[in-house]
Image: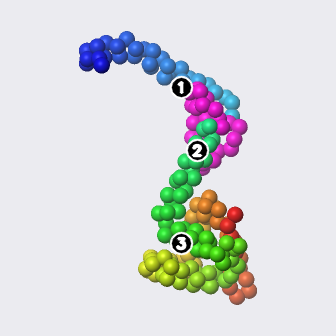
Amino acid sequence: MLGDEELKKKWEKDRPFFFGALYQTVKGVLGDGNPSANPSPVRMVDFYEMAVKAGRQLGYSEEKIYETFRLNRKKINEAVVSGNALLTVIENFMEREGNREGIKSRVSDFYRDLKIYVMEDCGINGRSFPGAPEVMTRKMSEDRSNLEDAGIYYEIKKGKNARYIEIWRQ
């Protein structure tokens, strides 16, 4: 254990080395012209590129950085899905025995089945659920990437008299 005065003296002595190492690292990051080998797993491509370059300067492999970003994105997606009632309900609904192979139906029928599932099996008040099939599909579209990250894919097609949804897990 060092006293305050001794610690301050040691810091003053080491400060040029500390800031020199920081400047060298920043210089290495800014001077690194090698592109990353992996595509960015996040939407902020520039941030990912800088993270790869910083990681290289600190001795981390690009594979390690890529895996860290991928796992982080997975955790964020799980948090988004668990914080969004509609996404959580869809994910749980698709886990049911009869739905694992996928569903093909009219959007209004899918909405009705999902709303019944919400009220009867999930114990969620129907007012917490979107008020109409159009609202549900709009919210699904807004969170499409989160659903796909959870392994749920869907297509909505217009038919002669109705819109149809095909939803499945991969």
Q: Magenta residues, as a range? A: 36-63
Q: Which mark is first along the chain, 1 or 2? A: 1
Q: Residue 26 shows which numbered tag?
A: 1
**Does residue 23 appear to the left or right of 60 in the view shown?**
left
Three-letter amino acid code at the position of disc 2: Phe
Q: Nearer the viewer, mark 3 or mark 1?
A: 3
Which residue reaches farthest bottom?
161
Dividing the image into 4 quarters, which one contains the C terminus?
bottom right
Decide: is 113 above or below 14: below
Residue at image position (64%, 66%) is 152
Q: Position of residue 39 (x, y in %)?
A: 68, 44
Q: Residue 46 shows which numbered tag?
A: none
Count of numbered badges drawn on the protein: 3
Would you say residue 47 sits in the magenta stretch? yes
Three-letter amino acid code at the position of disc 3: Val
Q: Nearer the viewer, mark 2 or mark 1?
A: 2
Residue, disc 2:
69
Query: Tags 2 and 1 in contact by the CB under 8 Å rule?
Result: no
